[in-house]
Amino acid sequence: MKKRTAVVLAVLMLCQAVGLGVCAAGNKADVVDENGESMAVETVADVNGADIDAGTAAEDGERTGDDAATVGGQTEDSDPVAYTGVAMPARFQDGVNGFALRFTRQMLEEKGTAENLIVSPFSVWLPLTALANASDEAAMEELLSALGLSGADMAVQNELTGQMLRSLQQEERREWLRQYGEETDSPLKIANAVFVGEDVKLRKAFESVFTDVYQGRIFRVDFTGDGAVEQVNAWASEQTDGEIRDLISHFDPETVAALANAVYFSDGWSETFAEGLTEDDLFRGAAGEETVPFMNGEFDDIPYYVGDGFEMAALPTQNGGRLLLLLPEEEGRSAEEVLAGLDPQELNRLLEADRTAVQLSLPRFRLESDTFSVLETLEAMGVPLSDDRDPHIDGLAQNRSLYLSQAVQKAMLEVDEEGLTAAAVTALMMAEGALLDPPEPVELKFDRPFAFLLTADGGDAGPVVLFSGVVNRIG
């Protein structure tokens, strides 16, 4: 099995980030023109008047401490998570993971009984957070609240997100090893892209933050033909080592832009399962019993936790990841109920669980979804961007007010004796908001007696009635 990168477990990986960061990316973006030629686009370093360079916070510790404390309602007394360059508030992590748990809970409500579920909350959260930079003030607070970032200042939010991305992908650790002649890949790869129509001009402020902070690339496509579908699907496949294919079947010709995210994680177990111990056994599934291969191993020192109606064991990977496995009690709550009952506090307890010896028997499995919509889920969670009559995305393209017309994802997870691979791609499609139909004119015909008042401007006294009367006849 290939071991490259995953996404459905990205929420768990967030909790394993270990303070690794490097300087912000350069100030040029790769753009592909209508002929497929690559060209460099100059970007600016200022978004809404705020310098978003990752080093800014390090140079101004007092400002960073105050501003960072506002993210997600973070207070000055909160315990920070150690990151290089930016003080990462613990509440920021809770906000990201809180969104993941709420998103998962909503998706659980929408799935059928006895069906599997594989989603990547992080692959939805990240492009929406980037899109917050293009949302108008009317939608900003509601959007940030839905993302678990209520009260956030976007400049600080971008700094924190950029630092998190560098840490998750172990950029500083890899750079440090490179100085000693050792090349190593990150188990986690995150990619962002915006595909824009040929006649669309991105706003410089959004372009800057998207390329510099979110490490995104910009591509020009023709949404009225099949070329756009082929380009987006090729990008998705390339970013996930071929695991996610055929994400998009077609684009609405009214599509103006599509913001895409890919997350790919692949890593081996710290302690592998011996293949010789794998044997067929009975899995008593929700839809009936089936005989499947079970991997068996005795692990001397892995996290173990007993919660309310479930037990948890965590399988660490070689580069800091963990697969948290939650087993409900017999005749107790369902797996869906256990997962839906988690909150950020309980998740933290799982992640901080004591280690012990565990004899583990786990089915070897692969989950793979078809392309599914997440738009209804986002609407239910309070994301205010999908009303075509009240579009709020006015900071992405020049002279255009856009709305979220589609939001789709495709995800997979494979687990075997050596490790795991997971991948997901999310695409947020935007179209131009509909022009409001002019109201039907009120018909008013003064063909019967009517009254009147005549006023004049009285300055501070306001309008002053000078004449009044009734017209009962004409002439």
Image (tube, grey):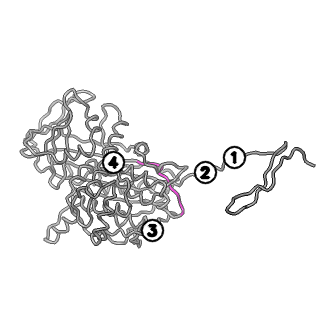
Q: Is residue 403 within the magenta segment? A: yes
In the image, residue 136 lies at what x, y percent? 48, 58
Which residue corresponds to the image point at 25% horizontal and 36% vertical from the top-left?
Answer: 338
- First in sequence: mark 3 or mark 4? 4
Amino acid type, residue under disc 2 in the picture: Leu
Amino acid type, residue under disc 1 in the picture: Glu
Disc number at residue 157? none
Q: Which of 35 and 42 is in front in this view?
A: 42
Disc 3: which residue: 204
Label 2 secondary element = loop
Mark 2–mark 4 Cα distance, whole angstroms, equals: 33 Å
Mark 3–mark 4 Cα distance, whole angstroms, equals: 29 Å
- First in sequence: mark 3 or mark 2? 3
Label 1: few (<14), some or many (≥20) within 10 Å?
Answer: few
Amino acid type, residue under disc 4 in the picture: Phe
Disc 4: which residue: 99
Label 3: few (<14), some or many (≥20) within 10 Å?
Answer: many
Disc 1: which residue: 440
Q: Is residue 401 within the magenta segment? A: yes
Residues shaded magenta: 399-407
Question: CB under 8 Å between callouts 3 and 4?
Answer: no
Q: Nearer the viewer, residue 466 or 96?
A: 466
Q: Nearer the viewer, mark 2 or mark 4?
A: 4
Disc 2: which residue: 436
Would you place residue 361 above or below residue 15 in this image? above
Label 4: few (<14), some or many (≥20) within 10 Å?
Answer: many
Q: Which of 293 and 18 is in front in this view?
A: 18
Q: How many marks?
A: 4
In the image, residue 102 lies at what x, y percent? 33, 43
Main SS of residues in magenta: strand
Amino acid type, residue under disc 3 in the picture: Lys
Which residue corresponds to the image point at 33% horizontal and 40% vertical from the top-left?
Answer: 105
